[in-house]
Image: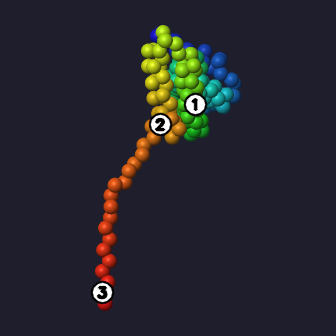
């Protein structure tokens, strides 16, 4: 897989809307905008990784540490990505043939594992705990 060359600062600034060019506390231009946040979240939900998205021209890096709003939306998009993995599992099962069964089994396991990590309450393994301890109580009545 080849990596796209990083666009120059000038090329990145042309690709972004004018109101996205704000100055951060450090004095560097920031490309943070709601439009870019929505684009990133939509791409995450559709199964792309943050690394893949950040390779695209004009996409940021290190917003998770800088913007709490983005971090919250990112976390929600990751949860929704688990539902996308579930859809991929169903699609894979529906389209499975005898010729593709072995490869599909590997993909199925990967999608299931990924969904269980992204949204463990819904797709994770259920853990049941048994409590096997007994407690004895002795009453002493003094008269």
**Which of the image's four quarters has the C terminus?**
bottom left
Residue assigned mark 3? 142
- Residue at figure coordinates x 38%, y 50% from the top left: 130
**Which callout, 3 or 1, points to the residue nearer the camera?**
3
- In the figure, residue 110 lies in which quadrant? top left
Residue assigned mark 1? 83
Q: Secondary structure at mark 3?
A: loop
Q: Residues within 10 Å of mark 2 (few under 14, many from 20)?
A: some
- Residue at figure coordinates x 51%, y 40% from the top left: 121
Q: Earlier in the sequence, mark 2 or mark 1?
A: 1
Residue assigned mark 2? 124
Q: Residues within 10 Å of mark 3 (few under 14, many from 20)?
A: few
Q: Earlier in the sequence, mark 3 or mark 2?
A: 2
Determine contact: label 3, label 2, CB under 8 Å: no
Q: Is 10 drawn above or below residue 116 in the view shown?
A: above
Q: Position of residue 17 (x, y in %)?
A: 68, 23
């Amino acid at each position: 897989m080849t990596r796209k060359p990083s666009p120059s600062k000038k090329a990145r600034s042309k690709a972004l809307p004018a109101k996205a060019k704000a100055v951060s506390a450090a004095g560097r231009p920031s490309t943070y905008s709601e439009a870019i946040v929505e684009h990133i979240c939509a791409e995450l939900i559709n199964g792309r990784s943050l690394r893949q998205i950040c390779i695209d021209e004009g996409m940021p890096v290190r917003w998770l540490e800088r913007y709490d709003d983005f971090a919250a939306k990112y976390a929600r998009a990751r949860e929704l990505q688990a539902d996308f993995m579930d859809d991929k599992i169903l699609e894979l099962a529906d389209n499975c043939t005898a010729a593709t069964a072995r490869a599909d089994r590997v993909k199925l396991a990967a999608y299931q594992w990924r969904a269980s990590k992204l949204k463990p309450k819904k797709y994770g393994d259920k853990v049941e705990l048994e409590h096997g301890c007994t407690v004895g109580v002795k009453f002493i009545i003094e008269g």
